[in-house]
Amino acid sequence: MPLSMVRPGQRAKIRKIKGGRGLVGKLANMGLYPGVEIEVIANRPGPLILNTGGVRLGLGYGMANRILVSPIS
């Protein structure tokens, strides 16, 4: 499931990033790579806000759509 489909308050683990080296590198510099657990804070029109390791990040819908995640119960 793409990160863009995760509801606010839900936790997920990054499985895969669909993109080239530039996107993968940019996300890795932000601390987002396969195996990282994240929590979605807000998912509404505008940037998707997530929390990872105590840091809040904002991602555009297109970028969030390329990050595949597995929900954590």
Image (cartoon, rainbow, N blue to C red):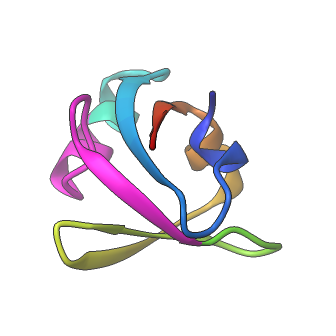
Q: Is residue 19 above or below residue 73?
A: above
Task: Please name whichever residue, 22 or 65, is drawn nearer the observer in this view of the structure.
Answer: 65
Q: Is residue 66 left or right of residue 43?
A: left
Q: Quadrant of the N terminus?
A: top right
Q: Is residue 51 left or right of residue 41?
A: left
Task: Please name whichever residue, 1 or 20, is drawn nearer the observer in this view of the structure.
Answer: 1
| Snapshot quadrant of residue 45 | bottom right
Q: Where residue 8 appears, x then y in whole percent?
A: 63, 68
Q: Where residue 23 appears, x then y in whole percent?
A: 39, 37
Residue 33 in magenta stretch: yes
The residue drawn where x is 78% and y is 72% is 44
The furthest residue to the front: 73
Residue 40 in magenta stretch: yes
The residue drawn where x is 71% and y is 45% is 5
Q: Is residue 28 above or below residue 56?
A: above
Q: Is residue 29 above or below residue 35?
A: below
Q: Where residue 30 appears, x then y in whole percent?
A: 23, 58
| Snapshot quadrant of residue 24 | top left
The residue drawn where x is 21% and y is 31% is 35
Q: Quadrant of the C terminus?
A: top left
Q: Where residue 55 appears, x then y in whole percent?
A: 24, 77
The residue drawn where x is 65% and y is 39% is 65
| Count of labels in the image | 0
Task: Please name whichever residue, 20 or 30, is drawn nearer the observer in this view of the structure.
Answer: 30
Q: Is residue 8 above or below residue 38?
A: below
Q: Which residues are magenta?
A: 25-41
